[in-house]
Image (spheres, rainbow, N blue to C red):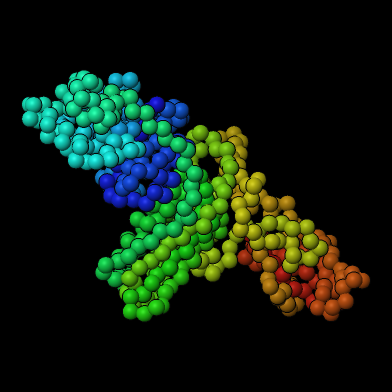
């Protein structure tokens, strides 16, 4: 079995192990800051053991800037190397070769999933070895099993087994149970948004690392700020237009909302809760960038939503009435292709954008006036009608009983004096012409 040990250096919650589920389903946390991962069957999926080591350190740095890791056949040796020879990949079936250059104090970290039950026993072993002139781990490795058993009994046998890769420690699959919740207490209350945000960000780093390990998406995040001099608290709700693991988006939205929040007194503590949903399954081309047009669109529309702005795509609807011809939708169209159409003829190249390809199939403009604008006879004379026959005729039906409904309209295409294509209609009851929309 090949085991990876990550030493996070600072005390962590057991839930931190969830962040490493991207490496293997067999992950185990050991107090106060060790993560053990069985990578025997998964390392080839991540670029080999060196690729796994690099990925583990990258994740570990989200918890502690100086975290380290190592890989060996057994958990005890992996833990020892993570501290004394960080970023080491010990040879398979020959991990003892990495004992070279290590002193006796390294024995204190030869633990794995089960720490030494009594620290004084291993310290006694170290002290006794030094009285014999033994100062390196390699020399202790060469001790015979019978000698260690006679001197220290079962503890001596356990020490020999760990030195010789005989202490089998099985890493069980991790079953996540903890909610995605983080907490922070400030010894010095803060009222400055930049400083407060910098204290919240490490908590978000941890939560989103766990989210990624769980292969889940975040659809909402709540941040509660507790004031110092009163029971007042601020609830900041961050909810992008669609669920994602884009931590930068959540950070940007949170920072903007914090800037708009007037803090009446400094903040003493805060809570961060992430509400997750199952990951969307999407088959990506190997070379397709993760940050595609759809992701950038969702970032943009999330900012707009938080600022109470309405935006989206105009979707053509099959409706009898012009006012209902288009619907504003925020979801990225499934058949939307952002590639431009490039036409080549002789030595000329013409680029035709396809962002409004749906509109070319509609005889109605996308820019409609909320209230049609009456045109006087002088304004009508200045227009150049594209045809003498109406392009569309709309009549009220028998089921329309409201006087506000359409009566009888003939629609025409016309060019204004500025050369802009506009959409006008003539009310056949009053003979009045109206401007109803512009073609984009």
- Residue 342 visible in image: yes
Nearer-the-camera pick, 161 or 424: 161
**Would residue 85 be found to the left or right of residue 308 on screen?**
left
- Residue 350 visible in image: no
Name which residue lies at 45% across and 30% down.
42
Residue 281, by quadrant, is top right
Nearer-the-camera pick, 104 or 220: 104
Residue 119, by quadrant, is top left
From the top left corner, tell me how far across and down residue 224 is, in percent.
Answer: 43, 68
> Quadrant location of the N terminus?
top left
From the top left corner, tell me how far across and down residue 325 is, in percent.
Answer: 74, 62
Nearer-the-camera pick, 86 or 393: 86
From the top left corner, tell me how far across and down residue 334 is, in percent.
Answer: 64, 47
**Would residue 209 be found to the left or right of residue 70 on screen?**
right
From the top left corner, tell me how far across and down residue 418 is, in percent.
Answer: 62, 65
**Would residue 164 be found to the left or right of residue 139 on screen?**
right
In the displayed structure, would residue 334 be above or below residue 401? above
In the displayed structure, would residue 191 be above or below residue 181? below
**Would residue 267 be found to the left or right of residue 404 on screen?**
left
Spot the residue most to the right: 398
> Quadrant location of the C terminus?
bottom right
Nearer-the-camera pick, 280 or 22: 22
The number of discs equals 0
Name which residue lies at 27% across and 39% down.
116
Name which residue lies at 82% across and 73% down.
406
Name which residue lies at 35% across and 55% down.
202
């Amino acid at each position: 079995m090949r085991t990876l040990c990550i030493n996070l250096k600072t005390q962590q919650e057991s839930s931190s192990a969830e962040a490493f589920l991207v490496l293997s389903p067999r992950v185990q946390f050991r107090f106060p800051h060790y993560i053990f991962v069985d990578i025997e069957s998964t390392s080839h999926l991540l670029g080999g053991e060196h690729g796994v080591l690099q990925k583990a350190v990258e994740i570990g740095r989200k918890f502690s800037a100086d975290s380290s890791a190592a890989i060996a056949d057994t958990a005890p040796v992996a833990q020892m190397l993570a501290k004394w020879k960080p970023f080491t990949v010990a040879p398979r079936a020959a991990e003892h070769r990495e004992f070279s250059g290590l002193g006796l104090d390294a024995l204190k970290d030869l633990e794995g999933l089960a720490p030494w039950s009594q620290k004084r026993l291993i310290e006694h072993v170290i002290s006794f070895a030094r009285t014999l002139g033994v100062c390196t781990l390699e020399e202790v490795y060469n001790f015979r099993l019978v000698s260690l058993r006679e001197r220290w009994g079962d503890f001596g046998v356990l020490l020999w087994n760990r030195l010789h890769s005989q202490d089998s420690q099985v890493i069980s699959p991790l079953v996540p149970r903890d909610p995605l919740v983080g907490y922070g207490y400030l010894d010095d209350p803060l009222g400055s948004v930049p400083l407060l945000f910098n204290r919240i960000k490490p908590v978000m780093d941890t939560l989103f690392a766990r989210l990624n390990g769980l292969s889940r998406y975040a659809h909402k995040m709540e941040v509660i700020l507790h004031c110092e001099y009163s029971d007042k608290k601020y609830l900041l709700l961050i909810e992008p237009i669609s669920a994602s693991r884009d931590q930068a988006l959540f950070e940007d939205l949170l920072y903007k909302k914090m800037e708009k929040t007037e803090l009446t007194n400094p903040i003493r503590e805060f809570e961060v809760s992430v509400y997750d949903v199952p990951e969307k399954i999407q088959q990506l081309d190997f070379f397709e960038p993760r940050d595609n047009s759809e992701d950038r669109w969702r970032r943009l529309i999330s900012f707009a939503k938080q600022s109470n702005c309405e935006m989206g795509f105009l979707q053509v609807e099959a409706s009898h009435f012009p006012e209902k011809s288009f619907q504003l939708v925020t979801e990225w169209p499934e058949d939307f292709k952002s590639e431009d159409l490039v036409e080549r003829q002789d030595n000329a190249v013409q680029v035709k954008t396809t962002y409004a390809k749906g509109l070319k199939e509609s005889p109605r403009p996308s820019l409609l006036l909320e209230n049609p604008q009456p045109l006087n006879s002088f304004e009508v004379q200045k227009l150049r009608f594209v045809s003498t026959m109406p392009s569309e005729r709309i009549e009220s039906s028998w089921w329309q009983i409201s006087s506000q409904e359409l009566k009888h309209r003939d629609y025409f295409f016309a060019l204004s004096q500025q050369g802009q294509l506009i959409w006008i209609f003539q009310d056949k009851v009053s003979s009045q012409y109206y401007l109803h929309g512009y073609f984009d």
